[in-house]
Image (spheres, rainbow, N blue to C red):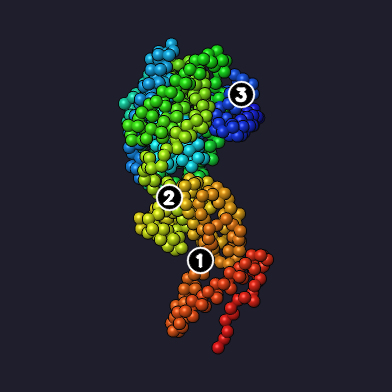
Amino acid sequence: MHGGAIIDGVVMLTAALACVILFRRLGLGATLGYIVAGAAIGPHALGLVGDPQGKLGIAELGITLLLFLIGLELSPARLWRLRRDIFGLGVAQVVLCGVALSMVVWGGSEFTLAAAIALGMPLALSSTAQVLPMLQSAGRLHTPVGERAFSILLLQDLSLIPMITVIAALSRAPPDPGAPPGWVLAVYTVIAVVGLVLAGRYLLNPLFRLIGRMGERELFIAAGLFCVLASATVMQALHLSTALGAFIAGVMLADSPYRHELEADIDPFRAVLLGLFFVAVGMMLDLHVVFERPLFVLGMAAALIVTKTSIIFGLTRLFGMAWRPALGLGLLLSQGGEFAFVLFAQAQGALLIEPRAASLFGAVVTLSMAATPFLMMASKRLRNAPPNSDTREGPSGSDGAAAIVVGYGRFGQTVAQMLTAQGLTVTLIDWEAEQIDVSAAFAVKVYFGDGRRVDLLRLAGAADAQLILFCHDDRETDAAQIAEVAEAFPDARIFVRAFDRRMVLRLHGAPVAGVVREVHDSAIRMARLALAALEVDEDEIDRAEVKYREGDVARMQAQAATGDLYAGAEMMFRPRSA
């Protein structure tokens, strides 16, 4: 069995790699590639891998990790800024689309009302895993359209828990004799939520602070996974949703200075497991059922896209959006989403629908997701609203900050404060836990993490930043590291603090806007003060500074050209004794 599991894993990963690469090249997105890979190798096609239900159970951990990362995004400040779009527009979209699509399913098929609700309600959810990467790659995540798309997707992801509750209430399955009654579950929910919040405040933050002082990244990864799995396990033991537990764990740490480090460490696990989840979903698709009723699948997918586009267009117009971006947003969110597969499985377990219906509507969701890239291309002009239409203030904090300052010590503090004095928004990152604690005492928010890592910089908003300033006390940074950051964020101008002349030479040729030796200008300033104290004329002091700087630049050029630190030694001004 162990050998069989390894072979299954190799087959799944091989198919996933091949299909995702192909679909990415075709511009159709990774999610659809994973689903097609699963359908191809599953028991209903080539039959290379079996037991899709068992593999889906393991891969559902990816959904748990996704909800944890969504919770990390929900800092109180961001919730407050987006409150109208999240809790107004988002709730209206989920409710109206859920009701409308349930009626479409009920009227266009032979399903009972309960089954139509169990099938139509999940169709109101769009694909977070597909839409957000498309917005990020297009650089539109922090535009008005992108922010409203994020707000709606966030509320949709949060609505997963109430939808599971509705399906459980409609369930025809015999009750689990070991499950507690409903009022007890309600009490358990309140106790669990309060307990997890208290644990986050008094246990998790001190734990991450301790690990931060140790500087061990492996411990951070282990602690982050422990946080997710422990909260999910507590909820499972109480017969509650594991996804709710992971989400609460994320919210507990949303304001933590260790948030970006946790996101960077957990996201690779989330990406792999979510990919395997989609592969398992593809394996569960009964293609024979789909081929039996191709017109139904096409018609229902078209009805899904038209219904959601119309409702979202109307709602966003009511919320003050111009018609062009409103229509573009409706098309952008018109597909079904990954959580629909989770809810179809819940409905099947509740005996509301048969496996054939789950496969049929799984194909509807898959087809609508396949249509999204084409709809995006067709709606490109519509989504590009005319200038000065529907503009709003950009996001604050780490979301859309103009500058990212890596290292908030004595050097970085001065740089960050001058930028802030000019009215720029600045995100601060440091890997010294003690520095973070000291900054917090002065009401300064500093995030924990290694700011040299591209994945962490991306999570901190570097894709939208105009400046990235490496102000940390690090003597090992070289041109290759800076080049990697510059390649990932080509629109940001990069500045680097250099410890000494050797480090400046190591950074020679790096794609930077400027390199500053940390004591160079302050030493020149002191020399000027000393000369002024000897009553040297100001013009003479200026000429001395220019002469020194020109000689220093000439020496640096000679050293960089030859790679020899002693090159240009004859240009030095050597002190003379009296």
* Amino acid marked by disc 2: Ala
Compared to residue 4, the image places residue 67 above or below, namely below
Q: Single out the mark in the foreground, 1 or 2.
A: 2
Specify the label residue 40 is tagged with: 3
Disc with the residue nearer the chain's start (2 vs 3) = 3
Disc with the residue nearer the chain's start (1 vs 2) = 2
Q: Is residue 66 visible?
A: no
* Amino acid marked by disc 3: Ala
Compared to residue 357, the image places residue 9 above or below, namely below
- Number of numbered discs: 3
Specify the label residue 518 is tagged with: 1
Specify the label residue 264 is tagged with: none
Q: Quadrant of residue 555?
A: bottom right
Pointer 3 local density, CA inside 10 Å: few below 14, some 14–19, many at least 20: many
Residue at which label 2 appears: 401
Q: Position of residue 172 (x, y in %)?
A: 40, 16
Q: Position of residue 227 (x, y in %)?
A: 45, 41
Q: Position of residue 249 (x, y in %)?
A: 41, 40
Residue 502 appears left or right of 119: right
